[in-house]
Image (cartoon, rainbow, N blue to C red):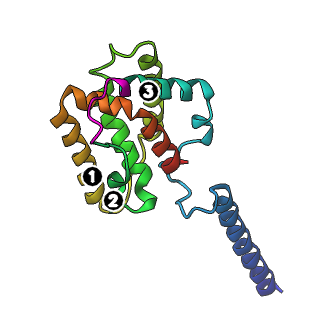
Amino acid sequence: MAALQKSVNSSLLGALAASCLLIALWVQGGAAVPIGSQCRLANSDFEQPYITNRTFMLAGEASLADNNTDVRLIGDTLFHGVNKGDHCYLMKEVLNFTLEEVLLPQSHRFQPYMQEVESFLTKLSNRLSQCHINSDDQHIQRNVQNLKDTVKKLGEDGEIKAIGELNLLFIALRDACI
């Protein structure tokens, strides 16, 4: 009788564990992401009409000052060779570069939008601060370095271009991290 009770208990625990895993996958939209993954943002972060509008207005204003229409910073080449599951980590790296090397030096420009957008993006960066990947990030670092090199090569025009592409950064973050 005791052996039968242990067998039933083991079966129930196994079924409960499998059910929890299925629920976790369902909550994540079926994505095979580790349950404790820190490379996620909430959908609600991107559903705030006010900050979305401010981000797109800032990008639009900066793109008017962007004279280099031949270069695209945030596009398909940024993701080249990077596994889809690592896209959020890639975008975290781009976000951190944009905040530290682009928005801070240009924070005096494009007011009143800059301060609010910078604050919003800093909040997203803080939420992604624990986002790491377990695999080799060589492709990611190379792609981010290419973006950095392009911005630096263009000088202040590169910074303006990066600000003009904040709408693309916003969309790429949303697509990669929710």
Residue 110, placed above or below residue 28: above
Residue indicated by mark 1: 143
Given the image, on which type of amino acid does mark 1 rest? Asn
What residue lies at 36% left-to-right and 55% top-to-bottom? 79
Q: Nearer the viewer, residue 111 or 138?
A: 111
Dot 3 crowding, Cα within 10 Å, few <14, some 14–19, many 20+? some
Q: Residue 111: image x %, image y %?
A: 41, 13
Is residue 70 shown left or right of residue 110?
left
Of circles 1 and 3, the one toward us is 3
Instruction: Check if residue 33 falls in the magenta segment.
Output: no
What residue lies at 72% left-to-right and 77% top-to-bottom? 10
Give residue 80's mark. Answer: 2
Q: Which residues are magenta?
A: 63-70
Residue 133, placed above or below residue 123: below
Instruction: Kindly report the distance in space between the C-alpha atoms of the residues bearing marks 3 and 2.
Output: 26 Å
Q: Earlier in the sequence, mark 1 or mark 2?
A: 2
Q: Nearer the viewer, residue 65 or 56?
A: 65
Q: Residue 115: image x %, image y %?
A: 43, 17
Instruction: Kindly report the distance in space between the C-alpha atoms of the residues bearing marks 1 and 2.
Output: 8 Å
For the stretch drawn in magenta, the main secondary structure is loop
